[in-house]
Amino acid sequence: MSCDHLGIFNSPMQEKSEKFPMITSFIRFLVIMVLSSFIIFACVPKGPPPPPPPAESLLLGTPFLGDETELREQPPETTRVETGNVSIEGWMSPPEKILRFPVELREAPHLSFRFYCQTTTPVRIGDLIFRVDYVPETYPSETGEIPIEPIMLFETTPVQTPRCFDEWILQDIDLTEHAPGRGELRFILDGPLAGDPGIDFFWGEPLIYHPLEARHKNILLIGVDTLRRDALSVYGASPIVTPNLVTFAEKSTTFTQARAQGPWTLPSFASMITGKLPSKINSMSFTGHLPERPDTIGEILLKNGYAKYTICSNPWLGYAESGFHQGMEEFWFSFDASAGDSVDQAIEFINRTQDQDWFIFLHFMDPHIPYNPRGEYRDLLLDPLIEGPYTENFDEIELWKSGEIVPPPEYIEQVRNLYLGEVAYVDAMLARLYKELEDLELLEETLIVFSADHGEEFFEHGGFDHGHTQFDELVHMPLIVMGEGFPAGSTIDTNVGNTDIMPTILRYIGLDIPVDLFGFPLQDVVAGIVDNSRIIFGEDNTRGTLRKFGVEWPYKCIVDWVTSETVLFNLENDPGEQVDISLANADLTNRLKSEIITNMLPTQSAFYIWITRSQDDVEKIYSGSLTVPDGLDDMKLFGLSDEDTWSLEGNTLTFTIKSASQALGPSKNIAIIPSIGSETLTASVEVNGEFRPDLFYPFGDRTQAESREVTVTLDDYPLGMNLPYSRDVDFEGFYIWGVRGSHQEENRVELGEETKAQLRAIGYTDQ
């Protein structure tokens, strides 16, 4: 068919085309080329679709209930049940007694699942039957569709499996003899007591997998709690502390400038498994948990057929509402368990999942206070010439943290040696795990990432423990990676962070990296694609005023989020962060401060109040009230003393606070978190019983209040760039500073009494 027949060049263009034959020919040529290209492109066969994952978790599906005719508009949701320290995600058996899953079997499939029973009703022989059936699709015949009888895959009773009342029972069924095709799996609870209200029966982590013949892509993510970088021999500690990690590093890539995104457990590990900054996912002290909103590495791997296991011993990760269970079908939590116990769990899991790709998040708690190393590791490092306390263990946590005890240098050294004894024990247990992977010939098909959540301060900056500063003894972390793409024995000095770990894992297994991740794959760092031009950020505190930092090598800027006090260090010349060079580098300091504020704007909006210390040593009593009319979610107070009083009734905080004198301490601070949608704060403030406009600055700068009562909104504030420095003589007073969060979706979770007790036992205080 010619182009004329298509009607493209009919009048009125016809006359013009006849006058300009060359133009006409050129236009016809273009049209023919476009049409030809379209036809050719349409006829080119597309590439094969990506292969299905080697395993398909039924947790991603929606089960039907009852027999073939019974469906519910609201399908059952999964739940998580714990027994014997192990929690499993799955379904409780419904009143209909049957869970039905449409499935498609490929070549040589296996079915694995777990079950567990709780009962307050006596169970006898024949009272309960647990069964799994497979029903292939019906097939057509001359007389219509012929149903195929269910094929029983598994059946047992409590008499045959009495352990099901105490622990999860794992079943693995070879379905190779069943022809590939579509069908339905039915998980059935049967018997006279199947509907008894005193019996709860759970089906856990049902999975169809296909044993792999190709090379595996396993992932072992090791996160050691409270592990200082310089506690490892690789980074400068005595060779006797971690000799096994030295051997590991010889076959790995060691990163020397890695930093955590928080100085305590929750924000740091949250960034590690989401690839995002704590403030962007609201995994901070205001919430106390990892919200459901961000996608975790476990959730991504669930969709890609991985067997997954979290092994941890810190309640910040392990308690039921922590949020770290997301995407992890199996989760083992034993408070303060030893590294040996945790490695036992990992080895057991690896041995039973050799036919699958697997992911383990292995957490160790041993270096966390209190320090109580086992005998041989304690004796390895303690100095026998030092007399006095702390020769076997250390548990005077609160006394050292509060400053009630200022220990002499030899005691600090002895306690640090106890800490190193705990690190040495972790190193020995890791050697067991490494040997197991070697014996199973899995090292070449496993990516191993060794890291930590934060470090520990031993009075380098006048304090002890962690969670209170952003100095490098708390945020400069170890990071060693072994596996494909990481040259053995190499050292990388490029600036990296915890947020780089998730994109590294995704690159390793060939998945696209979401554009909203903050980090970069470490493979790109090794290749030189990512360099030191980027800034690594970190934030949050469990005590003291909220601080945030940014490292643009070699400079590190730390901003007090409440007072706006800012310091700057050159880490290359001053790795101990002892010399503040901010005044001599004002432009650089202001630029980094601006980057920190704009990149770590919190998800939750907040009103920050601070009472700067007196500059003339004249006693000043600030009294009044703070009200959030549309609702108050949370409140935190920092630095208040016993002589200060406050009470919270509804949405109003009433207070009487004495300012610290110039010689006796820092500012006092309050953080108020309004409810979602709350925009305003009403403040009524007096100083020594009278209105003092020269000491009341409610707009985040030096603008004085016109009356003792003012109403301010979140949009009234200059985002911290003009905040007062509390040490400046001219800036004494009562200040309010508001920050609008990027969004505000999560509230603080309520910790259970057992979790609170566990957190108190390891040095966290929770009211």
Image (cartoon, grey):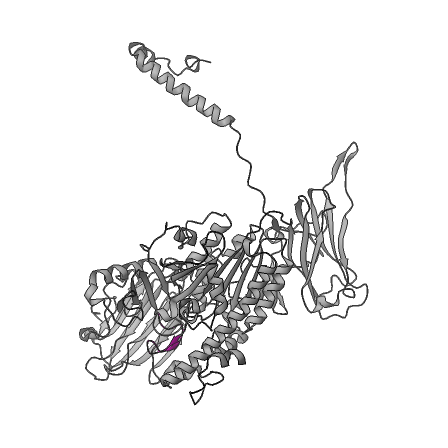
**Where is residue 556 drawn, in percent x and y?**
30, 64
Q: Main secondary structure of the magenta part?
A: loop
The outermost residue toward the right is 125
Task: Using the rendered image of the protein, determine whether residue 600 is visible from the camera's viewpoint.
Answer: no
The outermost residue toward the bottom is 388
Residue at (46, 61) in percent of width and height: 250
**In the rendered view, does 18 fall on the left or right side of 221?**
left
Residue 677 lies in the magenta-colored region: no
**Where is residue 629 drawn, in percent x and y?**
36, 67
* Front-lying residue, 765 or 300: 300
**In the rendered view, does 31 fall on the left or right side of 564?**
right
Name the quadrant of the C terminus. bottom left
**Where is residue 527 drawn, in percent x and y?**
39, 50
Start-end of magenta stretch? 457-469
* Front-lying residue, 480 or 179: 480
Task: Using the rendered image of the protein, determine whether residue 151 is visible from the camera's viewpoint.
Answer: yes
* Front-lying residue, 751 or 474: 474
**Where is residue 172 drawn, in percent x and y?**
69, 56
Q: In this view, does 524 lie above or below 163?
A: above
Which quadrant of the figure has residue 158? bottom right
